[in-house]
Image (spheres, rainbow, N blue to C red):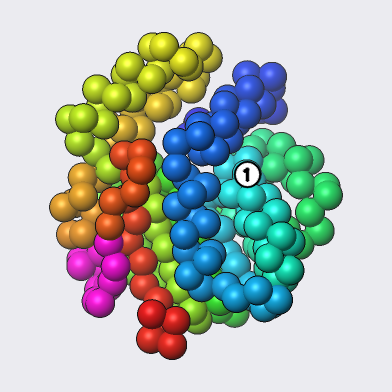
Amino acid sequence: MDRPQPISDDLRLDLDNIEKLNRRFGSYDLIRHFLNRWILPAESVSLLDLCTGSGDIPRFIADWSRAQNSTVRIHAVDFQPSTLSIAEARSVHYPEISYEAADVLHFSPAQPFDIIICSLALHHFAFPDAVDLLRRIRGFARRGVVVADLARSDFGIVGIYLLTSLLVKHPMNRFDARLSMRRAFSFRELAAAAVAAGWSGFGHRRFPVSRQAIWLESKARA
C-alpha cells in the first residue's frame, strides 16, 4: 500500500477490505468517541483528516455529522494519487469532503482546523518521522487533535495472524495487516513519541480491538 501504483482492481479490493476492517474492528467506534466529545449537535466545524487512504473515515464522519444535524467541513490529505482518485470517486455524494495530494511530513494547512485526525497511519513512519509529524500537527488544531493507531503487542500479533488466516483472503490485505501490526508502536512507545514531540497534558488510552489513541484538546472542551 505504501508503494506508488496505478489504479487497479487489486487496489480497489484492498481498499474495500480495509474499510470493512475499520468498520468491524473498532476504527469507526474510536473516531466516534472523539466526535461525540468535541462536536455538539447543530454545530459547524472544520476537520482535517491526514493519511486518508480511500476516504472511508471522512465519509463515516460526514454520515455521523448529518445524523447529528452538524456541519463538518472535511479536508482529506494523502500522498498516493491513485488512492485519492478512488477516494474522490467514492465521495461524489459528499460535497462536504475535499481532497488534496500531499506528503503529510511537509504539508501545512493555510489556516488551522478545529479538529485534526490521523487514523491508522503512524505505523507507516519510522520513529523520528512519527515524532516530527506529531510535533507539526499539534499546531494545526484549534479544538482537538487525535492520532489513532494499532497497539503492538504479542496478543495483537497472534490475533492479526489468526484473523488474516481465517477471514482475509486477499494477498495484499494479508501482507499489509501483518506488517502493520509488527510495525505499530507499543503503548509505551507511542507515549514516548508524543513526549519527544513536545506534547504535554495529552490523553492516551487503549481501544478495542488492539487499538490506541493519543490526543490533545483545548481546555474548553476537556
Name the foreground residue: 15 vs 213: 213
> Taking 209 as reference, is 40 left or right?
right
Q: Secondary structure at mark 1?
A: helix
Q: Is residue 198 magenta?
A: yes
Name the foreground residue: 82 vs 153: 153
- The picture places residue 162, in percent across and down from the top left corner, at 33, 17
Query: Looking at the picture, which amino acid does disc 1 mark?
Result: Asp
In the displayed structure, 211 sits above or below 169; it is below
The quadrant of the rendering that contains the C terminus is bottom left
Q: Is residue 116 magenta?
A: no
Name the residue rendered at 32%, 61% in the picture: 214
Name the foreground residue: 156 vs 50: 156
Name the residue rendered at 43%, 46% in the picture: 121
In the displayed structure, 88 sits above or below 108; it is above
Residue under numbered circle 1: 56
- The picture places residue 60, in percent across and down from the top left corner, at 64, 50
Name the residue rendered at 38%, 20% in the picture: 163
Start and end of the magenta stretch?
193-204
> Taking 37 as reference, is 127 left or right?
left
- The picture places residue 54, in percent across and down from the top left corner, at 63, 40
**Does the rendering let one see residue 140?**
no
> Taking 157 as reference, is 73 left or right?
right
Q: How busy is the neighbourhood of tag 1: few (under 14 within 10 Å), some, or many (20 plus)?
A: many
Q: Which residue of the protein is positioned furthest toward the bottom in this rendering?
A: 220
Quadrant of the rendered image containing residue 69: bottom right
- The picture places residue 66, in percent across and down from the top left corner, at 74, 61
**Does the rendering let one see residue 172?**
yes
